[in-house]
Amino acid sequence: MVTTTHTQHAQNDQTVIHVKGLINRFGPVVVHDDLDLSLKRGEILGVVGGSGTGKSVLLRSIVGLKRPNGGTIDVLGNRLNELNNEQRSQIERRFGVLFQRGALFSSLNLQENVALPLIEHAKLSRKDAEYLARIKLSLVGLPTKAALQFPESLSGGMVKRAALARALALDPDILFLDEPTAGLDPIGAAAFDQLLVTLRDALGFSVFLVTHDLDTLYATCDRVAVLSQKRVLVADTLENVANTDDEWVQAYFKGPRGRAAQYATNASTAGLKE
Ligand SMILES: Nc1ncnc2c1ncn2[C@@H]1O[C@H](COP(=O)(O)OP(=O)(O)OP(=O)(O)O)[C@@H](O)[C@H]1O
């Protein structure tokens, strides 16, 4: 049985992920070299960086899909590389993961898609799992009738919501999102951002969010980590990160799109928007 509090690797109650000295390689290609990063309980951490800087590989290392070449990853007080398979799968059950192309099963309707992890991991009967699945689907704002619809008949925004419902099926402690608003129109993306913050506030999970979407960063993130040169260049509040003296950071945050996203946030905060 995995204990998730007070093991020798617990950093403190406020840290749910602690990555230290991470090394990842693919053959001769070094992706991460001595990378450190923490995720605090209840926060939404945005992970940004240029294309190919290793954001997805970092996510995959933490959720157990890529074995690191070095360093340590402590999750919920457990050092991942010291766990046996049973302990590891117990920890992984406390994750909800929404991949960029983490499509739903096209042959299953939405309620069957969301019920699947409840049947597989929580060992619920199909009837109970589908009942709970319908609750999860309404939690993410989908209408009741959507439960019996198939993914191909839905808009991109509805599919993302359903995928989020599936990621939330087992009431995760940590939600991992890889480009959740990619492919959504700006209104759909903004609605998804709002939903994420509302659910985090209500349910209290922590979020590891890989994104390129500046609007999402401004709308949702408590802190932002910038990946650059194989490690985390800076992890701090948006304001502090945006003022970091780095070429990529300046181009990203102070370019036209960054300024527009910041303006929209300021306007929203000042009550100038609805
Ligand atoms: N399975 C793999 N085999 C070989 N190389 C890989 C593999 N997965 C990732 N890489 C390499 O690792 C590097 C980091 O990839 P990753 O997908 O994490 O980047 P990213 O920061 O998420 O990029 P993007 O923003 O474009 O999605 C890239 O050079 C990529 O080619």
Image (spheres, rainbow, N blue to C red):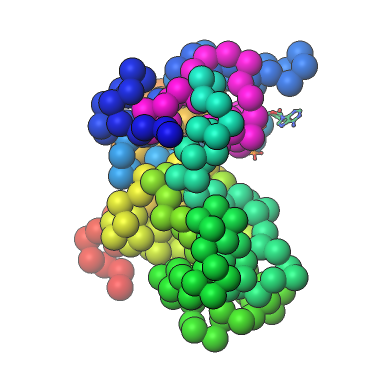
Give residue 206's position: percent from left, percent from top.
37, 45
- For the residue pair 178 and 230, the one nearer the viewer reads as 178
Give the residue displayed 35% in from the left and 33% down from the top: 4
Ligand 1 shows up in the quarter that is top right
Question: Magenta segment, which residues?
Answer: 53-80
Give the residue displayed 68% in from the left and 18% down from the top: 25
Q: Is residue 58 left or right of residue 168?
A: right
Q: Is residue 212 left or right of residue 242?
A: right
- For the residue pair 211 and 68, the one nearer the viewer reads as 68
Q: Is residue 57 magenta?
A: yes
- Name above or below for residue 222 compared with residue 74: below
Q: Is residue 143 left or right of residue 206?
A: right
Give residue 80's position: percent from left, percent from top.
50, 25
Quadrant of the frame with the N terminus: top left
Give the residue displayed 36% in from the left and 20% down from the top: 9
Q: Is residue 87 magenta?
A: no
Give the residue displayed 36% in from the left and 32% down from the top: 3
Q: Is residue 40 visible?
A: yes
In the current view of this chain or complex, which residue is farthest to the left?
270
